[in-house]
Image (spheres, helix red, strand yellow):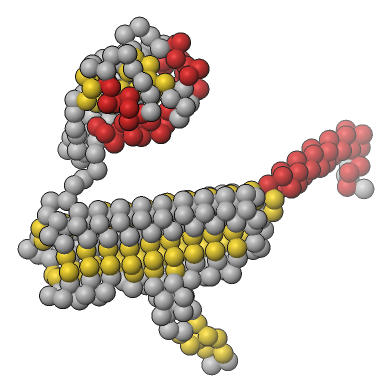
């Protein structure tokens, strides 16, 4: 039975590589070293690392662990280097967490496709599957679908007719894709639903008339779509997810939405139809965006915000309805002061009123 002190990367679930020389590790981390030939076998947190492990320090809160760590090397910022214990190599870099991410991927590389199609998969004869792709058990692939080399389809994926999936994509189990063109190095996590009808109806006195959803979903290179997230295809134009976009689990993207390169949408957020989100914008958890909005580049939408108006580039908004973050916090402080003043008045009124039936504050 494993404990919390065990090192990461259980070999039952994660690939391993190594050992790696410290010189190569330092190069990947963006650091340098005077002992390039020293070998390391893995990675581990400061508190459980041993002499053959690489660790890191990025948060000042854990600086106390640095002085007692047994790690053979530590990736850290320049200000912490003097506190590295004897025997540990300091790999100094401006961004330790990025360095750590790259070194962790060095020791635990992503899965590589095992070329072939599982016997239980159902593949239309008109589908085009690169010989280097891996098609898992129970997958269904429609006519004229294209699967690029090095891509992996997990068990029970359904790929609709005409869908294009680029090279080196990772499509996890139970993903369904229709009406979509997907770039290279894209990851779709389990249960993601891509390309289904958008929620579009013409409303009249007689009820709802469905509007045909005739667009597609376009997903750029390097994007990641979280587990159980849904991306509707466009109605007349396309739904577009830009390169490097990261979408967390259980996120809803409606028809005709466009999301610029490098944007981030966090868990349980939702974007209504025809809204445009600029590059590098951040939409935090459970935020909701109304339709037909423009969210500028680098804007940040706070958790549980209700956004009903455009947000300028670089602006931070909070609250429901959302407003500028500075205004939001001024309102919070004002309400807090009013509440405290009210409690103070009520307390004084009760004290002055003695045994009366009504206090001063109520009068």
Does 30 appear above or below 36? below
Q: Residue at the location (42% across, 28% down)?
A: 96
Q: Residue at the location (48% across, 88% down)?
A: 209
Q: Nearer the viewer, residue 148 or 8?
A: 148
Q: Residue at the location (54% across, 52% down)?
A: 281
Could one spot residue 226 in this view of the protein?
no
Instruction: Please state the horizontal and vertical placement of residue 109, each as a whole percent of the image.
Output: 24, 39
Does 255 appear above or below 61? below
Of all residues shown, which one is farthest toward the top?
Answer: 86
Does 136 appear above or below 144? above
Instruction: Please state the horizontal and vertical placement of residue 304, each as a whole percent of the image.
Output: 57, 53
Is 254 situated left or right of 344 in this image?
A: left
Is 195 situated left or right of 22 in this image?
A: right
Considering the image in quadrants, where does the N terminus appear?
A: top left
Q: Nearer the viewer, residue 78 or 2?
A: 78
Q: Nearer the viewer, residue 91 or 250?
A: 91
Does 196 appear above or below 286? below
Instruction: Please state the horizontal and vertical placement of residue 9, each as a whole percent of the image.
Output: 24, 33
Q: Nearer the viewer, residue 337 or 144?
A: 144
Q: Residue at the location (41% across, 34% down)?
A: 98
Number of labelled discs? 0
Is 305 situated left or right of 121 in this image?
A: right
Instruction: Please state the horizontal and vertical placement of residue 86, each as a whole percent of the image.
Output: 35, 6
Q: Quadrant of residue 247?
A: bottom left
Of all residues shown, which one is farthest toward the bottom?
Answer: 206
Of all residues shown, which one is farthest toward the left?
Answer: 119
Q: Quadrant of residue 137?
A: bottom left
């Amino acid at each position: 039975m494993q404990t919390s002190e065990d090192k990461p990367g259980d070999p039952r679930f994660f690939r391993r590589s190594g050992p790696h020389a410290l010189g190569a590790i330092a190069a990947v981390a963006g650091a340098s070293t005077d002992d390039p030939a020293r070998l390391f076998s893995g990675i581990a947190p400061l508190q459980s690392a041993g002499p053959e492990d690489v660790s890191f320090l990025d948060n000042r809160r854990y600086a106390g662990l640095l002085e007692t760590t047994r790690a053979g090397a530590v990736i850290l910022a320049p200000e912490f280097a003097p506190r590295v214990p004897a025997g540990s190599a300091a790999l100094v870099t401006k961004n330790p967490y990025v360095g750590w991410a790259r070194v962790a991927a060095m020791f635990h590389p992503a899965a590589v496709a095992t070329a072939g199609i599982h016997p239980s998969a159902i593949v239309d004869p008109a589908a085009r599957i690169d010989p280097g792709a891996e098609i898992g058990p129970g997958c269904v692939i429609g006519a004229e679908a294209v699967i690029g080399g090095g891509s992996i389809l997990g068990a029970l994926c359904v790929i609709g007719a005409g869908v294009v999936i680029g090279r080196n994509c990772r499509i996890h189990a139970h993903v369904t894709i229709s009406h979509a063109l997907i770039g290279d190095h894209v990851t779709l996590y389990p249960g993601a639903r891509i390309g289904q009808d958008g929620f579009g109806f013409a409303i009249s006195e007689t009820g709802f008339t469905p509007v045909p959803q005739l667009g597609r979903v376009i997903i750029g290179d390097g994007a990641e779509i979280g587990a159980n997230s849904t991306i509707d295809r466009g109605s007349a134009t396309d739904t577009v997810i830009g390169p490097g976009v990261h979408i967390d689990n259980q996120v809803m993207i409606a028809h005709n939405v466009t999301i610029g390169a490098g944007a981030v949408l966090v868990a349980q957020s939702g974007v209504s139809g025809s809204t445009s989100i600029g590059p590098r914008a951040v939409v935090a958890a459970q935020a909701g965006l109304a339709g037909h909005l423009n969210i500028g580049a680098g804007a940040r939408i706070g958790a549980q915000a209700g956004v009903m108006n455009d947000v300028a580039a670089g602006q931070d908004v909070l609250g429901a309805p959302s407003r500028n973050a500075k205004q939001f916090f001024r309102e919070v402080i004002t309400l807090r002061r009013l509440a405290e003043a009210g409690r103070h008045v009520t307390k004084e009124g009760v004290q002055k009123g003695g045994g009366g039936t009504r206090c001063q504050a109520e009068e």
